[in-house]
Image (cartoon, rainbow, N blue to C red):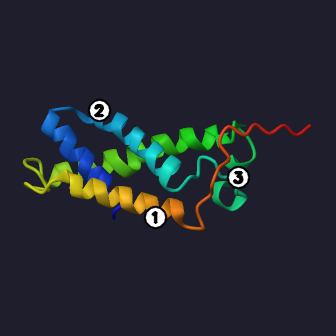
Amino acid sequence: MILYGFPALILREYVRRKGLGYHSLMFLGMLEGVLMEGLAVNTFYSDSQAKLDLFSSYGRIMGVNWNWALYLTFFHSIYSVLVPVMLVDSIYPDGSLTGEMPLSYMMAAVAGVTLLFNLSEDTYRPLFFLITYSP
């Protein structure tokens, strides 16, 4: 809930308060995908065959699996943010879901869980700017 629900709710509230449309929400969803997969879970750098399947063996430049990164960026934009927000908007078309609750509490929770994910032993830790060459 914290890693996927809170960011979608934060972005929905931000877009509604600023009077932006779904196209802006989709762009912000792309940023959310980069933050979740790039910072929280670190799968952009993973080379695990079990996690990435077909994406694990090609498209890697400077330690980043660009095919996987591009795929997940759009996946998060659509399925983690845009679709849930559109469904919620169809049920609650008028008004805020958070009321007067500061969104900073949710952002702090997301940042805290992201930090915990990064410190866990199961998270892949990339070697930044490592360029490997294997003939």
Q: Is residue 77 above or below residue 88?
A: above
Q: Amino acid at mark 3?
A: Asp
Q: Spatial distance from mark 3 to mark 1, Cα to Cα?
A: 21 Å
Q: Quadrant of residue 28?
A: top left
* Residue 43, horizontal then vertical, whole percent: 58, 52
- Report whether residue 47 is seen: yes
Name the residue beneath numbered marker 2.
24
Q: Spatial distance from mark 2 to mark 3, Cα to Cα?
A: 32 Å
* Residue 26, horizontal then vertical, whole percent: 34, 37
Question: Residue at point 35% right, 57% down?
Answer: 110
* Residue 68, horizontal then vertical, whole percent: 60, 44
Question: Is label 3 or label 1 in front?
Answer: 1
- Local packing at callout 3 (Cα closer than 10 Å; few below 14, some 14-19, many 20+) is some
Q: Quadrant of the N terminus?
A: bottom left
Name the residue beneath numbered marker 1.
116
Q: Quadrant of the C terminus?
A: top right
Question: Residue at point 17% right, 50% down?
Answer: 90
Tell which circle, 2 or 3, labels the residue nearer the N-terminal end: 2
Question: Is label 2 or label 1 in front?
Answer: 1
Question: Residue at point 60% right, 68% down?
Answer: 121
- Local packing at callout 1 (Cα closer than 10 Å; few below 14, some 14-19, many 20+) is few
Of the numbered discs in the image, which one, if any, rests on residue 47?
3
Q: Amino acid at mark 1?
A: Leu
Question: Residue at point 54% right, 67% down?
Answer: 120
Question: Is label 2 or label 3 in front?
Answer: 3
Q: Is residue 35 above or below residue 135?
A: below
